[in-house]
Image (cartoon, rainbow, N blue to C red):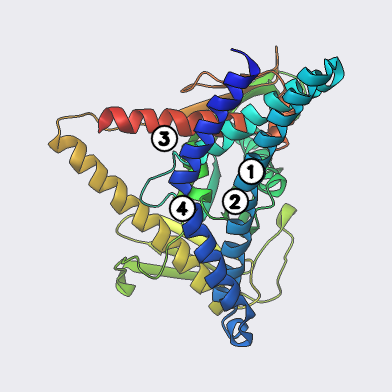
Amino acid sequence: MDPEEQLKELGATLSGIEQVLDLDGMRREIAELREQSADPELWSDQEHAQAVTRRLSYLESELNRVEGLRQRLEDAATLYELAGEMDDEDTRKEADEELVTLHKAIQQLEVRTLMSGEYDEREALVTINAQAGGVDAADWAEQLQRMYLRWAERHNYPTEIYETSYAEEAGIKSTTFAVKAPYAYGTLRGEHGTHRLVRISPFDNQGRRQTSFAGLDVVPVVEQSDHVDIDENDLRIDVYRSSGPGGQGVNTTDSAVRITHLPTGIVVSCQNERSQLQNRATAMSVLQAKLLERKRQEEAEKMSQLRGEGTSSWGTQIRNYVLHPYQIVKDLRTGVEVGNPAAVLDGDIDEFIEAEIRWMRQQEAQAG
């Protein structure tokens, strides 16, 4: 396909994206949020103020991204015209390189339009648990936590760690953190499942190969409009002292809070605040998010049974990270493979995420 045809095709794809994203609606919302953020009273409610500024920053960035791509498409067309008029190979090469970059950028943006689930536009709560594999699994859980925090950092998404339970020798037993960006849940929900690591164990003095597992749970953050009934009598609430790596005390008071929901066995903890009341409020919002997701899954299973379908099992083993005897990271659902595990573990996981969003949309369409 010649460059002119490719530019035309990319222009049509971008027009479709602009329609789905509703740029005029975005501009109206940006104007309203700017008005709110100029109100000096806004910061009397810190949480609401932060939500407003996060949403505003996200929308401005999305709008700039789309408008910037439209401008770059026009500039690329001009470059090709110049290259033709001047018969200049260097200008043509520059235009070809920009065309490749534009193709990738528009493809990435298109993925965002595939997120149309009920809770996809929410922020995300991520919980990681060490599974089979002893001390290696605890170390692996900590590596996964770092991978997702680095991924969020690469995208300038704010994160907040609510709880980390450290293992005795190395690594962590579990952690829960929030990714505070619009569409974080829609982006990360395909990461839910078991992640498997194969490597030479640094904890085995005989240098044997070890396979270890960690489970990832992703749920949408609850909002005021969500209705989740929680009976206080169904809760066991424990307070304890926060601890750091190697069992060292972080706080001198019993401010950390653990809540057990007795009917479901769901356990949530929070230890990031100094105040026991704040930790309890955060732990309750995490519990609400997990119960809401459980309710949603039960309803989806009921609908599947009514339709006579088997239930979807996305939350099984989803990805292998092999560091020995060869180096590869492979997604078992989409078939995406990357031969550089170090980059992946440093948060370079967008290729996996984009492919699984497309894959999930396909699965939902087939079920549909």
Q: CA distance from mark 1 to mark 4?
A: 18 Å
Q: Which residue is mark 1?
A: 148
SS class of the residue under badge 1?
helix
In the rendered structure, which disc, 3 or 4, sits on the residue that comes first in sequence?
Answer: 4
| Residue 244 x %, y % | 71, 58
Q: CA distance from mark 1 to mark 2?
A: 21 Å
Rendered residue at 56%/29% (across/down): 10
Q: Give the residue type at disc 4.
A: Glu
Rendered residue at 30%/50% (across/down): 296
In the rendered structure, which disc, 1 or 2, sits on the residue that comes first in sequence?
Answer: 2
Along the line of sight, the residue nearer the viewer: 27 or 235: 27
Q: CA distance from mark 3 to mark 1?
A: 18 Å
Q: Count up the numbered dots.
A: 4
Count residues near mark 4 (Cα–Cα under 10 Å), then give few for <14, some for 14-19, many for 20+. Answer: some
Q: Are the residues at dot 3 and dot 1 in contact (C-beta closer than 8 Å)?
A: no
Query: Can you tell which mark lies on residue 62?
Result: 2
**Whether residue 41 is situated above or below residue 112 in the rendered picture:** below
Observer-side mark, 1 or 4, equals: 4
In the rendered structure, which disc, 1 or 4, sits on the residue that comes first in sequence?
Answer: 4
Q: CA distance from mark 3 to mark 2?
A: 30 Å
Residue 134 horizontal side relative to residue 341, left or right: left
Q: Which residue is mark 4?
A: 121
Q: Give the residue type at disc 1.
A: Tyr
Q: Which residue is mark 3?
A: 315
Q: Is residue 51 visible?
A: yes
Observer-side mark, 3 or 4, equals: 4
In the rendered structure, which disc, 3 or 1, sits on the residue that comes first in sequence?
Answer: 1
Residue 181 horizontal side relative to residue 247, left or right: left
In the rendered structure, which disc, 2 or 4, sits on the residue that comes first in sequence?
Answer: 2
Q: Give the residue type at disc 2.
A: Glu
| Residue 134 x %, y % | 60, 35
Q: CA distance from mark 3 to mark 4?
A: 20 Å
